[in-house]
Image (tube, rainbow, N blue to C red):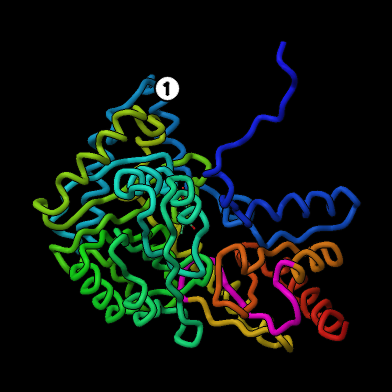
Amino acid sequence: MGSAETIKPAERTRDITYAVRDIVVLAQQVAAGGKRMLYLNIGDPNQFDFRTPEHIIEAAHQAMERNENGYSPSSGIPAALEAIEAQAERKGIRNILDIFITSGVSEAIDVCFTALVDAGQSILVPTPVYPLYSAVLNKLGARPNPYFLDENNGWQPDLDDIRGKIDRGTRGIVLINPNNPTGSVCTEETLREIISLARQHDLVIFADEIYDQLILEEKKHHSVAALDVDAPVITFNGLSKAYLVPGWRVGWGVASGDNAIMGAYLEAINKLLRARLCANHPEQYAIAPALQGDQGHLEEMKARLRRRRDLTVTMLNAIAGISCVRPEGAFYAFPRLEIEGTDWDFVRALIKETGVVVVPGGGFGQRPGSQHFRVVFLPPEETLEQAYDQIGRFMQSYSAA
Ligand SMILES: Cc1ncc(COP(=O)(O)O)c(C=O)c1O
């Protein structure tokens, strides 16, 4: 028997963090002490008063009963692929080259990055960003190349910053639209500028549009792929958010553009898809009913989210030392803090003293010197009101301390 040595984890895991869940460890300790917690940190509608539409559950249930419980084709079942294609075409995406179903958008990101970047290369990622993007790049030994979203311009991508950060190792650019964690929705002009930069520098555009059905303003959502038939784009979407089944892990990628440019890359993606066999099979039978069936729940969901967004913006902006840009989509806000010290310290103290759980801005990245936190406004109005009251009171003592 050898001497018991600590097993050394791989270097590539060193920079991987996921603040959204990391902060839960502290929240659990505080909750164990008996404090009443108010959770504003979880982007999972089913944890609150949102329920999966019955016909979506029924479709997956029926598939299981029919014994569709084996492996599926690696890209997914034909009925679901057709429904995804029709949905993409409704959004104006033409020149569709390939569609693949994955275990959530999360797996699509992993597969698409793995097939594209070599160690040392980079992909432009928004800052702040949904942290999985940086985590996957770190895992691959590649580099997240952060470009700023501009808080003074409604959190639109800062085009000058993007221009200045493209170098020879840059292979792609991520656009999260509507955005997590800011709730911003890209303007058509911004998207056109990004397409032009991407085409000039041979970048693949990764368009994460998982919140595209949750637009809370009278504003059209533009799929970036719809604005240029030849631009190399992979558009991500899935059932997690708008169709209220995040735990089923159903997402997909739609590749579009010029086949002469994208063909070899798409073959590399398909090799990886085959190697991992397939995405969850019976749940794929819910994709066509979800995308093509009754959409009634979406109006109700957006109506609730609008009320909760308005409450969030009004109450947070009334607190001295906090300012909050109005989110136009999704269910997140990213308010700015004027404080001494870091947002990590602020959030840790907030959780311990009040039981209100939010995520520090540092977990998503932000302009150096600025401090933020992310709020999820999925909880019912009573919960949000109590939480914002608590934050207001806490802020008074925190600023005075
Ligand atoms: C921007 C964004 N992309 C992807 C995901 C993950 O989606 P999925 O559940 O399809 O893996 C999330 C989840 O919060 C997200 O906010």
**Residue 35 locus on image (x, y percent):** 88, 57
Can you name the residue that lies furthest to the top here?
1
Question: Does the magenta segment cover residue 338?
Answer: yes
Q: Which quadrant of the rendered structure holds the N terminus? A: top right
The one nearer the camera, 126 or 377, is: 126
Which element carries disc 1, helix, strand or loop?
helix
Quarter of the rendering containing residue 178: bottom left
In percent of the image, x 34 and y 54: which residue is there?
Answer: 236
Report the front residue among 183 and 193: 193
Q: Where is residue 245 in the image (x, y as percent from the top left)?
A: 49, 45
Give the left or right position of residue 164, taking residue 342 as reference. Answer: left
Residue extending farthest front: 3
> How dense is the environment of label 1, judged by Cα within 10 Å: few (below 14), some, or many (20 and up)?
few
For residue 256, side relative to residue 113 (left or right): left
Q: How many marks can you see?
A: 1
Question: Does residue 263 belong to the magenta stretch?
Answer: no
Question: Residue at horizontal 69%, vertical 84%?
Answer: 338
Q: Can residue 218 be seen in this view?
A: no
Above/below status of 206 relative to 67: below
The residue at the far right in this view is 33
Query: Could you say where residue 132 lies in the image, as x and y percent from the top left?
Result: 49, 53
Q: In this view, does 101 lie to the left or right of 303?
A: left
Residue indicated by mark 1: 65
Q: Position of residue 252 (x, y in %)?
A: 34, 46
Q: Residue at x 23, y 71 (%)?
A: 195
Among the 4 quarters of the image, the one containing residue 58 = top left
Q: Quadrant of the C terminus?
A: bottom right
Overall secondary structure of the magenta section: loop
**As shown in the figure, which amino acid type bears the numbered disc 1?**
Glu
Q: Give the extent of the magenta segment.
A: 328-344
Q: Is residue 322 visible?
A: yes
